[in-house]
């Protein structure tokens, strides 16, 4: 029987697309089950996603840093979209104050590891998604080994130490990075493909081109000190999920070299252009290269908080 939401004709058409084989798709040969065709029907009829795009999502391995404010909606939308494997890095435990914005967790999950709580939510939402639990704190020493096993990384951490470690590791391992940050009523988002060049042959910017150095310790108040609008985390985490899917499927215009800034007070979205800095310590022309994450590089002194907001 065809899935309930599709007509017999649409079912036959979509099944024919899926059964067409490797000549149609640029991903490793795989297929969608009848349940998956029903589940992802709204993607399959999108011209810029369709069967080929859905198979790319199914083949993708995404590493999510942090199962907190940004990671909660990000993980849920990636799972709903049919990402084949999601790795979750977080060593923190669920506390009552998290539940105002970290919507992947609930009251029954209090004191549980966030990575385990988030993994349970993924399995409830979509049994076709495999989940890897990394209940560790990401550091300069382990970042590269964590990143290497995945195709793309989404960083939802809330401290510069982690952000620099992740971005350096992605550069070293040649992995795309989607990274976002939250303020009280504002957020920002960009995509880093620093291991590649643009159409003119100029290197794409690194995270260190955008933020050359971290702010002094204590210069930026923590979430616990300053507060945060809960729904803003949902908006920015959802935008992160969309950017991850964009990078996998290839629709629209990437945020490489563009910083999206969201002001929730005035409900304004603005985009800032930024470019490659030839003096940056990763890919610059004249520089003293930093040791990559996992190779003994110095760690930024930017705070001791958990890796998620």
Image (spheres, rainbow, N blue to C red):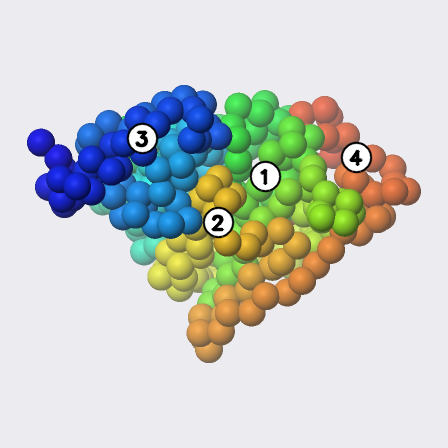
Q: Secondary structure at mark 2?
A: loop
- Report which residue position mark 4 lands on: 290
Estimate how packed mark 2 is, as few (under 14), some (14 to 19) or many (20 or more) residues with alpha carbons within 10 Å.
some
- Report which residue position mark 2 lands on: 251
- From the viewer's perspective, is the residue at label 1 or at label 3 nearer? 3
Pointers 1 and 2 in contact (C-beta within 8 Å): no
- Residue at the location (34% across, 50% down)? 46
Earlier along the polypeptide chain: callout 1 or callout 3? Answer: 3
- Report which residue position mark 3 lands on: 18
Pointers 1 and 4 in contact (C-beta within 8 Å): no
- Report which residue position mark 1 lands on: 176
Residue 189 position in % (x across, y down) = 54, 55
How far separated are the C-alphas under marks 1 and 3? 27 Å
Along the line of sight, which residue is nearer the eye, 271 or 215?
271
How far separated are the C-alphas under marks 2 and 3? 20 Å
How far separated are the C-alphas under marks 2 and 4? 34 Å
- Residue at the location (31% across, 30% down)? 18
Q: Quadrant of the N terminus?
A: top left
């Amino acid at each position: 029987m065809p899935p309930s939401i599709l007509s017999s004709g649409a079912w036959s058409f979509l099944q024919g697309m899926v059964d067409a084989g490797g000549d149609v798709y640029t991903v490793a040969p795989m297929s969608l089950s009848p349940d998956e065709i029903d589940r992802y029907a709204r993607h399959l009829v999108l011209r810029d996603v369709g069967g080929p795009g859905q198979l790319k999502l199914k083949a993708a391995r995404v590493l999510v840093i942090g199962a907190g404010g940004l990671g909660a909606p990000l993980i849920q939308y990636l799972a709903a979209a049919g990402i084949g494997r999601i790795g979750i890095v977080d060593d923190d435990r669920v506390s009552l104050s998290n539940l105002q914005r970290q919507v992947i967790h609930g009251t029954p999950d209090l004191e549980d590891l966030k990575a385990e709580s988030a993994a349970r939510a993924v399995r409830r939402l979509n049994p076709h998604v495999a989940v890897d639990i990394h209940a560790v704190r990401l550091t300069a020493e382990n970042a590269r080994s964590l990143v290497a096993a995945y195709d793309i990384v989404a960083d939802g951490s809330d401290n510069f130490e982690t952000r620099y470690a992740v971005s350096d590791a992605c550069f070293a391992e040649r992995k795309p990075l989607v990274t976002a940050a939250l303020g009280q009523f504002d957020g920002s988002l960009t995509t880093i493909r620093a291991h590649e060049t643009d159409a003119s042959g100029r290197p794409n910017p690194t995270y260190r081109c955008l933020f050359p150095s971290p702010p002094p310790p204590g210069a930026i108040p923590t979430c616990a000190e300053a507060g945060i609008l809960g729904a803003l985390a949902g908006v920015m985490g959802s935008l992160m999920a969309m950017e991850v899917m964009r990078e996998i499927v290839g629709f629209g215009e990437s945020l490489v070299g563009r910083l999206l800034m969201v002001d929730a007070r005035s409900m304004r979205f603005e985009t800032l252009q930024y470019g490659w800095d030839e003096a940056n310590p990763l890919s610059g022309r004249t520089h003293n290269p930093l040791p990559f994450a996992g190779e003994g590089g110095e760690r930024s002194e930017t705070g001791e908080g958990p890796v998620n907001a």
